[in-house]
Image (spheres, helix red, strand yellow):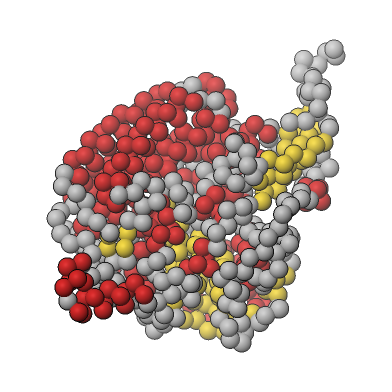
Amino acid sequence: MSNNSDPRTQLTLPSGITVEHDPDDLWSDSRMIVNIGPTHPAMHGALRMAAKLNGETIESSYCAFGYTHRAKEKLGENRTFHQFIVYTDRLNYCSSLVNNVTYAMAVEKLLGVEVPERAVWIRMIVSEIARVVDHLVCVGINAVDLGAFSFFLYGFHQREEAYTLIEKLCGARLTTSYTRIGGLMFDAPEGFEKELKAWVNRTRKVIDEMDRLLTGNKIWHQRTIGVGVFNKEACLKYSYTGPNARAAGIDVDLRRDQPSMFYKNVEFDVPVAQNGDVFDRYAVRIEEMRQSLNIIAQCADRMKKGPIWAEDKRVRIPDKDVVHNTMEGLIHHFKFFMTGFEVPEGEAYACFEAANGELGFYIVSKGAPRAHRMRIRGPSVYHYQGLSSMVRGEKIADMIAALGSINIIAGELDR
Amino acid sequence: MDIRTPIPTNGGDWLTKFGETWKAQAEALRQKFGGAIEEIRMPPDYPTDVPIVYVRKEAVAEVLAHLKSDPAFEYGFLSDITATDEMTDPRFEVVYNLFSHVRFNRIRVKVRARDGEAVPTASSVWPAANWAEREVFDMFGIRFEGHPDLRRILMDERWVGHPLRKDYPLKGYQIFTDAEVIHPELLDKG
């Protein structure tokens, strides 16, 4: 041994990045190409990363996806506006309700339809439930990837209860298809507000518990602080949105800064962190869940009885007794489901703060019942694009931490 | 307080908030770039939610860079790049959706391109444009000049045709039995 107390030295690679050279690591300085995914338990969905390793350090990498491509944008041009609602569930399947709501908002924007008050409050409630569920999944799975299994179970119990609430609204747990153009499929049942508030109170406690369990944990700190850093400039370059951007200090939340629905009328804070590492993304998500629960409680207080569907003959599916008992109702019903309603010519980009960031629907209509162009802007595409530069020079195990923390959902990525 | 603030409908809420800003910006763009701006479609006159700026193909990177950094615009955030197939001449419109983190308003830039023509890349302005342009190439077959790595992104590399073109069938299956290989040359770029 030399006198130098630290045997590690800095090594500059041909590509210009400096990595740590560890003489104790047998594999240091050897190059190996590793294919991670598309079907690997640590990759969240069918994602693939080809990485060139120097020992355990990722020297360079590139990402590939498209393994679950279902041609949703093409289908959007071949299905009526009503039929396309079910396809939006399968975008980000962890928070399908947000997708339903955003899609309905886009078509309503084109049509100029205003949604009744009660429907808007319920839409806000379901969006926030979906956000809580999505964040629970994200922080839970991220912790599982790093070895903290019990943390995940706390969250998943609450997630199941949230799905039971969603089931009471629309009869489905995962693929909800809850919104209709101009309103909602079903009204909330009797006593829904009470159950909702009970769930909110229970979930608040569970999130505090999860917070105490993991946030101060030393191993968690060592695995997450300073890992997968993506600073403010990088986030802007790669169009990062949502919690991932807010973890790096970009103080933008479309609910507050580009308000839609009644978000102007509820009070909530937007948590922002500074470092943009895995820990900050985790911390931002934990705090966002608390804020979402506050929003749900406020919405539950303020929603009143009323219609849940706009009184607009174009978009409203006729009631069943009208369909079965009148000729006009039957014709209306058949016209609605066989040809669909015509959306006036024009184009609109409706976007909303989904759980992972800006979810946008850019619809171009040429006056037909089908869209001329149905573009879905999912946040995951842009987040995944930044992964290669995020993990350059990091250990391969830290890549898994970084991937879990930016919460890529393959359904939204591949569309 | 009246809480019945409606969902911003077509041109409603955004127009009262940003109408004047947009008008001033449209005027500034016309003065700065002159002939490079083909036309500007403003919201109340044309059914759109935000102004659409049609830019001549050659000048698009320059206009986007100006929109990004000029203090009168500050559209620093690239929301999305996509395209539409209009089946006319010129056939395609490449669409850039921009968002401002300063004023919180949006604007849309469009470029018309004929089939087979290349559009200058925006990836030098925003690195995020890289994958978005790859997707446009994959789905529509529009090439981007100066793009660092213009490969297919969603479809298999061996795929023939561009699925989102209007003349592409809804069920155009192509079956591949073996997997895509890794490209070591992509890993050498660093």
Residue occupying the far bottom of the picture:
B89
B39 in relation to B79, above or below: below
Residue A332 position, x and y percent, is 26, 77
Asked if residue A31 lies left or right of residue A271, the reply is: right
The residue at 30%/49% (across/down) is: A171
Looking at the rendered image, the quarter that the N terminus of chain A falls into is top right
Task: Name above or below for residue B96 compared with residue A88.
Answer: below
- Residue A344 spot, x, y in % from top left: 37, 80
Residue that appears at 44% across and 60% down: A87
Most foreground residue, A257 or A144: A144
The residue that appears at 39% across and 84% down in the rendered structure is B45
User: At which x and y percent is residue B72?
Assistant: 50, 68
| Residue A248 or residue A403, whichever sits in front | A403
Above or below, A227 relative to A327: above
Is residue B74 among the parts visible in the rendering? no
Picture coordinates of residue B88, whole percent (x, y): 58, 86
Depth check: give the residue in front, B1 or A378: A378
- Say which residue appears at 70% left-offset and 64% top-offset: B159
Q: Is residue A368 left or right of residue A386?
A: left
Q: Is residue B36 above or below residue A268?
A: below
Q: Tell me, yes or no, if residue A297 can be seen here.
A: yes
